[in-house]
Every structure is written in C-alpha cells, then in structure tokens.
Image (tube, rainbow, N blue to C red):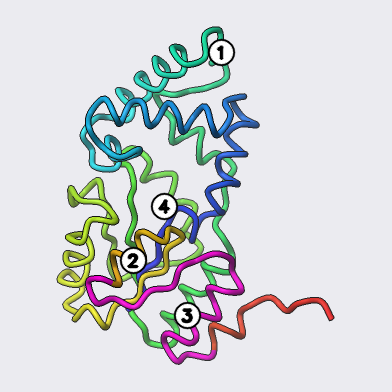
Amino acid sequence: MIWFDFGGVLSPPLAELYASYERKTGITPEQLVGAMRTVAEGMGLPTLAPVELGVVSEAEWGRGLARALGAAHPGIDLSRARLETFGEQWFAGVTANPLMVAALRCAREHGLGVGILSNNVVEWEPYWRSIVEPAGEVDFLVDSCKVGVRKPDPEIFRLAARAAGLAPEQCVLVDDLAGNCAAAAAEGWRTVHFRDDRQALRDLGRCTGLAAFERLAPRTAA
C-alpha cells in the first residue's frame, strides 16, 4: 500500500505555497514561519503542531499569528491577510500536483492500496480535499488532527499500518520531508523521499516493482 503525503507531494511544493501566500498577503515566508514558531514555542510544541494536533482552533491560531507578526515586525501591514481563516486563503487558487495525482491513480489501477497520511488541520479539510479530488477515492485517510498524533511521531505509522491491516514492510510512504521518511523507515516501512516528480516516480517504480510509475515521468529534452 502506498501512503501519499498531501502538503508538498499531492499539493505543489511548500516553497511554491509560501510564495503564493506572500503574493496574496505581502507576508514573506520568513515572517510567516517565524510567527508560526513563536506561537508553537509558547505551547512547547513544534512549528505547526498546535493546529495539526487540534490543540487550538484555526481562529485562535490565526490570532496568535497576528500578535506574533505584530510583535516581531512593528508596523507590518496585515490588511490583506485573513489569518483567522488561514486555510481558505492559503489554499485559494492551489491545484494538485498532476503527476503525483497520476501516480496515485496508477497505483490504484494496478491493484495497490492507496492512502493519504498527512499532518493537517481540521478546518482546512474542505480546501485540501477539493484540491486532491482529481485523484479519486483513497482506501484510507490518516489525518494528524483527527488521530491526535503527527509525523514524524512513530505512533502515526503504527496506527496507519494497523488501520490498513498491513505489516510495516507492506507500507510505502511518499513524503517530501526527510525526517518523516526516516521515522517511517525506522518502523519498517519502505519510503520514497519526494524531491521532484521524476525522481519520486523512478523511486516508486523501484520500490514497488511497478514500471508503470516510471512511464509517467516527464521526458528530458534531447
């Protein structure tokens, strides 16, 4: 069974999402990440854990971001940012990564189980689900905000394998974060560290023995 990450795999790369958000709001990636860290550190948690674990609501988190941004950058213009409904603005105009959507569909068509294993936020579900809708149905969804544990915590990989009724070695994780891949591998999973579409499709083909993945890869110019 292949478990796909959402952010940075089925979605565009995170750098593109941050750049898009800056165009919408004027808030730079550095400013935004700094504010996220400030809010999380105040709770003793990793950067996005407060919302990815459902510790606070999106609205509470957004108000915390506004305070952190104002304190770190006096006079910053937040007039274009809708921080209390962050997800709606963050995902506006975002479309899925077509090659990873094709990979998910290819896996399903060739009889492999498919799932989404994601650190995500309760209030963001309508937006990210609409983005991945072209991929069709998945067999399992394991979402951090619903199960109360997030990658790279080993428990989320144990939980996902149990939910699918599979041994760890029957699970493959496709994720853009090396730390998540390392944590999954430590639990006995096979992993594909997504760095770009061509590499990920090639590695998926090698990992599963399914040549159809490699045939999806874009051809290089002659």
Residue stretch in magenta: 186-211
The image position of residue 49, as x and y in percent, is 28, 40
Residue at 41% from the left image edge and 52% from the top image edge: 129
Residue occupied by mark 2: 182
Residue occupied by mark 3: 204
Question: Which callout, 1 or 2, points to the residue nearer the camera?
Answer: 2
Direction from residue 167 to residue 85 in the image, left or right:
right
Question: Which callout, 3 or 2, points to the residue nearer the camera?
Answer: 2
User: Quadrant of the image for the C terminus?
Assistant: bottom right
Q: Are marks 2 and 4 in contact (CB under 8 Å)?
A: no
Which mark is drawn over residue 76?
Answer: 1
Residue 155: name its quadrant.
bottom left
Mark sitting earlier along the chain (2/4): 4
The image position of residue 147, as x and y in percent, is 18, 52
Question: Which callout, 2 or 4, points to the residue nearer the camera?
Answer: 2
Front residue of 146 and 191? 191
Type of residue at label 2?
A: Ala
Type of residue at label 3?
A: Leu
Mark sitting earlier along the chain (4/1): 1
Q: Residue furthest top?
A: 75
Q: Residues within 10 Å of mark 4 (few under 14, many from 20)?
A: few
Callout 2 secondary element: helix
Callout 4 secondary element: helix
Which mark is drawn over residue 129?
Answer: 4
